[in-house]
Amino acid sequence: MHTVVVGTSGVTASDVLAVARGGARVELSGEAVAALAGARRIVDALAAKPEPVYGVSTGFGALATRHISQELRAQLQRNIVRSHAAGLGPRVEREVVRALMFLRLKTVCSGHTGVRPEVAQTMADVLNAGITPVVHEYGSLGCSGDLAPLSHCALTLMGEGEAEGPDGVVRAAGELLAEAGIKPVELREKEGLALLNGTDGMLGMLVMALADLDMLYKSADVTAALSLEALLGTDKVLAPELHAIRPHPGQGASAANMLAVLKGSELTGHHQDDAPRVQDAYSVRCAPQVAGAGRDTIAHARVVAERELASAVDNPVVLPDGRVESNGNFHGAPVAYVLDFLAIAVADLASIAERRTDRLLDKNRSHGLPPFLADDAGVDSGLMIAQYTQAALVSEMKRLAVPASADSIPSSAMQEDHVSMGWSAARKLRTAVDNLARVVAIELYAATRAIQLREGLTPAPASQAVIEAVRAAGVEGPGPDRFLAPDLAAADAFVRGGNVVAAVETVTGPLQ
């Protein structure tokens, strides 16, 4: 099994994906163990002094003014975890919780948190045992980090609360730890706070969204090219010299992908046939500009994610010179903004894809295709309601594009009076990304059917490769009306599996 070694300098996106989705094992480097021990010595020294230090010998948040005596500090750390584990609503996905735990471990191993090595090792042991704390949808405001979600994870380390075992059954966390031979941790000064104060949930969801969008944007370039082909559009607008004079990198990459898909097609360039056109509609002609803007947004989001993956997010932090200082690095604004930016880009990509699908189905704009791509229009409705489904998805995505990070709601008796709402931004982006796959699948379904209805004209070899692959996957082609939902579900699974890109790349080589 693949193993990810966590050191002091952060982790990579591929590390997160390996642990969250691939079930990779986690190990602590010797460097990390030494840094953990060194920082802990600083915390222990401060804990022994009479002067109050936030997070070590004081209360938290609005209660930070109270000095806590030594005999109450272990109880203080247990209490912060128990009281902050206050989430409600449905459970979040296993991969999200594993990313959340792994990223918190990443910060703990930086040597800036003051957590003992044995606590970090327990975090790794829980991940390696396949134990997944029950974390709920609601509870994080994205400031002081993802407090409630991280608290539910910390609760499991203490042997309390509920968790999902490797068999997928939710049971008492204490039982699962015992079966795995893991001793529950007894938290000491600062450790409870250090386990809660991070942007790890929103960051984990950002990393996974970026991975999904890399594939989906390539898939959307392919389906846009298929729609252009089915509509007898021109590929001249994709010429590299045109995109070179407006040098947005994403736009150039998207145009190049579409051009590669369309190479060798007999369907493109029929503007001057029976129904002459000077230009294609915006949804066809401007596909690279819209998808490209989204690609550039993804590139910016990836830079933010990389910076955050290299960060130690905690409050207070232990500095190399021995100081333990309060800070605001737990604020989720940098991550929240890009999560919201991505939701906007994803909604717009879905919107333009839906417009192309609608054009394929409208006999007045499809340049010779049958109404709704039906076999016997009137008797058959064809893909009429498939486009309704696509429109409903796009409409929801437009609502999900309303930024969460523009909101703030004060908490903790006005001590935490400006929050990021980054967790909420991440949760709605996950829904938007899910919906984008469905929207792309419906365009794929319509475009492949439309191309097959252009009898006498041979599609591009790459297009033909997609058509053959999707048909082999159980997605049927043109014909009389049938139960459509299974076909659409199969198309959705085809897209999510990366099969659109894989089929094209057998002909074109790697897409950009």
Image (tube, rainbow, N blue to C red):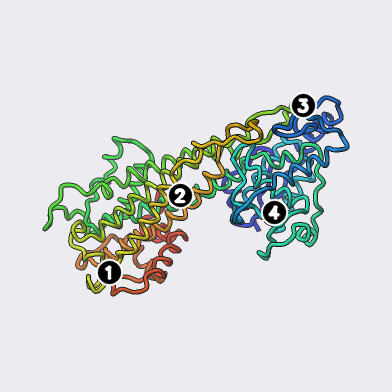
Q: Position of residue 436 (x, y in %)?
A: 42, 53
Tag 3 residue = 322
Q: What residue type is labelled 4?
A: Leu
C-alpha separation, residue under disc 3 versus residue under disc 4: 31 Å
C-alpha separation, residue under disc 2 versus residue under disc 4: 27 Å
At 72% from the left and 28% from the top, the residue drawn is 319
Tag 2 residue = 214
The earlier-in-sequence mark between 1 and 2 is 2
C-alpha separation, residue under disc 1 versus residue under disc 2: 34 Å
Q: What element carries label 1?
A: loop
At 71% from the left and 40% from the top, the residue drawn is 108
Q: Which of these two is toward me, 214 or 191?
A: 191
Q: Position of residue 368 (x, y in %)?
A: 18, 62
Tag 4 residue = 127
Q: Is mark 4 on a helix, strand or loop?
A: helix
Q: Is mark 3 on a helix, strand or loop?
A: loop
At 34% from the left and 36% from the top, the residue drawn is 247
Give residue 74's quadrant in the image.
top right
The earlier-in-sequence mark between 4 and 1 is 4
Tag 1 residue = 381
Dot 4 alpha-carbon crowd within 10 angstroms: few under 14, some 14 to 19, many 20 or more: many
Count of numbered circles on the image? 4
Dot 2 alpha-carbon crowd within 10 angstroms: few under 14, some 14 to 19, many 20 or more: some
Q: Which amino acid does label 2 sit on?
A: Asp
The earlier-in-sequence mark between 2 and 3 is 2
